[in-house]
Image: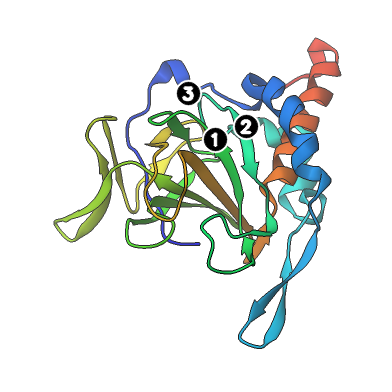
Amino acid sequence: MGKQSWSTESNSAFAAFSVSSVAPWLRLGLAGVLAGVALTSWLLVGDRPQPVRALEPRDTQAALRGVDFWQGASFPVENFQEYTSPFGYRQSPTGGYSQEFHYGLDMAAPMGSYVRNWWSGKVVEVSDDSNCGTSVVVESGQWLHIYCHMQGHVESRSGGKYLIDREGGLQIWEGQQVSAGDRIGRVGMTGRTTGPHLHWGLKFSENWVDPALVLQAMYTAQEQRAALPTNQRK
């Protein structure tokens, strides 16, 4: 995976961007992504295979909080086009070896599309020196969410590090608080990538989680909430 990066700019007109805004995208794309996903796979480390556990949302404490819990989450990219690579084993997109484990979900979007923070939390890392490219990592309780291949680069000042994307009007500092739906970067092609997309990775309590399962939980919660009588919705 790699290190990550963010953006301070938050437009109030977009702050309400949430899973309900992208229900059609989830409906169109998730079935295909979920079809080939195994919840427990094996990663070869040296000569010994190591288990890579992908926790289903129902296995996590967070998911047990009920339907309204997921209403606080945001879909992570604007101008979404399609899911291009799921979580799990895949053929190497750049050649050199036959298979690799992909620790996230790739979401294609036009170059320069804004990336949205999935959940309110703290930026714990910004980086531009790994396969992840210019990237941000956010910590939200037991969750870590990772955003890769974005535009811009990392600079340091006064003992701190920040991601800077001047063209996109973004400056994201390590240590800053960000809300769900805040713009934290723009889709680019930094790091190891063959086309513009967001690589979105998730960990819960140190375990890698398949982001497609989380998106499915978000969409299901949104559908269930929409079916409730108006006076029962929070």
Circle 2: residue type: Glu
33 or 230: nearer the viewer: 33
Res. 192 in view: yes
Q: Tell which residue pokes out farthest to the left in this image.
A: 158
| Mark whose residue sits in front, 3 or 2 | 2
24 or 156: nearer the viewer: 24
Name the residue carrying label 3: 15
Residue 94 % position (x, y): 51, 57
Mark 3, Cα crowd under 10 Å, few <14 / some 14-19 / many 20+, is: some
Q: Circle 1 sits in a helix, a strand or a loop, which is it?
A: strand
Mark toward the start of the polypeptide (3 vs 2): 3
Mark toward the start of the polypeptide (3 vs 1): 3
79 or 141: nearer the viewer: 79
Circle 1: residue type: Ala
Res. 217 in view: no
Q: Residue at x 64, y 37 (%)?
A: 83
Q: Circle 2 sits in a helix, a strand or a loop, which is it?
A: strand
Determine the CA span between mark 3 and mark 1: 22 Å
Residue 137 % position (x, y): 45, 53
Determine the CA span between mark 3 and mark 2: 23 Å
Contact between marks 1 and 2 (CB within 8 A): the answer is yes
**Image: 52 above or below 225:** below
Give the left or right position of residue 173, taking residue 226 as reference: left
- Numbered circle sitting on residue 108: 1
Q: Tell which residue pokes out farthest to the bottom in this image.
A: 47
Name the residue carrying label 2: 82
